[in-house]
Image: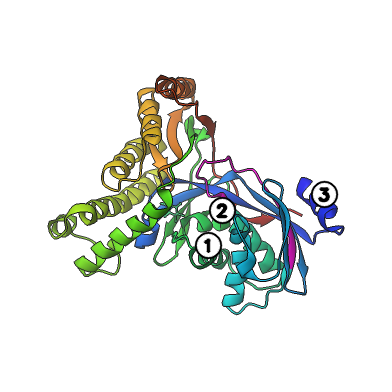
Amino acid sequence: MRVAGAFRETFGAEPQGVWHAPGRVNLIGEHTDYNDGFVLPFAVPWGVTAAVAPREDGVVRLRSLQAGGPLTVAAPGEAEGWARYAVGVFWALREAGHPVGGADLVVDGDVPQGAGLSSSAALEVVVATALNELYGLGLTPMEVALTGQRAENDFVGMPCGIMDQAASALGERGKALFLDCRSLASRSIPFDLSRHGLQLLIINTGVHHELADGQYARRRRDCENAAKRLGVDALRDVTDLAGALGRLSGDERRRTQHVVTENHRVEAVVGLLRAGAVQEIGALLNASHLSLRDQFEVSCPELDVAVEASVRGGARGARMTGGGFGGSAVALVADDRVEAVREAVVRAYAERGWAAPEIYPAGPAPGARRLA
Ligand code: GLA
């Protein structure tokens, strides 16, 4: 394994183990996780692999085969850039009172660049999974996910929800993860596309609009303000949507409309999948995209064009996936329409003078695990 070889070369010793944690794609349930709502992501076949050995002196030495290094970090506050996602996990575990020392780590990632498929959650979860085992912490996969989220929220400073880390830690081959982000109860939902002659294409726009970072926190604030005005703990609790919309205006009204309807769409998709009616989820994917574009306002031209061209090319449905403002769209496509959809998207991009997006099929892969 290349990461173990790089570990030997970097640190002149054997790693104690090699772990892998995947990125994720979200089938539906966008911007619902931090509203205590429902999500339906799955783990993708790409992620972060880490060769790790513990150290007793508390020091963390890190090398990334993509970003360089090795870096030596004696105290968490010294970490910068990508290293914060890894070092933040040591910090989060220590904050929670776990007896975690240092470690030497080499990490190797293959999540496509700019795809918005949660390479940062994969890095957090692979480090947390390795430390859980090396230091005998006895954390459940959900506790591993929560550790990654804590690192990202309070160490890196990105106020994300639990979806990405949960998908990475709990994913299963052939299954999507139906997660209640309030109770953290989860259920595996069979998502077997090939049996239905279908593929889920990931269309990687390759763009990341810089405003994304501040906008995420603003959306979250809009939702919290709306919940407060409505007197509920979270938008998840809104049952009378028409009544709620009558009491809100502007951004808060639009955000509420999206979150409440999106939760219903997740439940509807889960129902259809459990009934074996995979083809039927397309309309809900389309509705989710329109809601994210018009009510939640987190799409962008590259995502809209990818979605519209996919549908025109014959996709059953398509939507942006992840936080928005770039990253990827997903399209549910029958096997015999895949080429037509590809061509439609590439042509639509060319007409606008945009570079062709990368397009690849993905199905649910296993979650975090030890490889060696
Ligand atoms: C990002 C966050 C997730 C989630 C999505 C939107 O990926 O990390 O927690 O909020 O955006 O659904």
CA distance separating discs 2 and 3: 23 Å
Q: Is mark 1 within 8 Å of ligand 1?
A: no
Which badge, 2 or 3, comes first in the chain's sequence? 3
Query: Residue drawn 58% across and 40% down?
Result: 112
Answer above or below: position of 69 versus 358: below
Q: Which residues are magenta?
A: 103-122
Secondary structure state at the residue bearing disc 1: helix
Which badge, 2 or 1, comes first in the chain's sequence? 2
Instruction: Specify the farthest residue to the right.
Output: 12
**Quarter the C terminus occupies:** bottom right
CA distance separating discs 1 and 3: 30 Å
Q: In front: mark 2 or mark 1?
A: 1
Which badge, 1 or 3, comes first in the chain's sequence? 3
Where in the figure is residue 365, as x and y percent of width and height? 58, 46
- Left or right for 230, reference 210: left
Tell me the residue that label 1 is attached to: 156
Q: Amino acid at mark 1?
A: Val
Label 3: few (<14), some (14–19) or many (≥20) C-alpha neighbours in 10 Å: some
Query: Residue drawn 42% across and 21% down?
Result: 344
Q: Amino acid at mark 3?
A: Gly
Tell me the residue that label 3 is attached to: 5
Secondary structure state at the residue bearing disc 3: helix
Residues at discs 2 and 1 in contact (Cβ within 8 Å): yes
Tell me the residue that label 2 is attached to: 120
Secondary structure state at the residue bearing disc 2: helix
Q: Quadrant of residue 106?
A: bottom right
Where in the figure is residue 36, as x and y percent of width and height? 36, 63
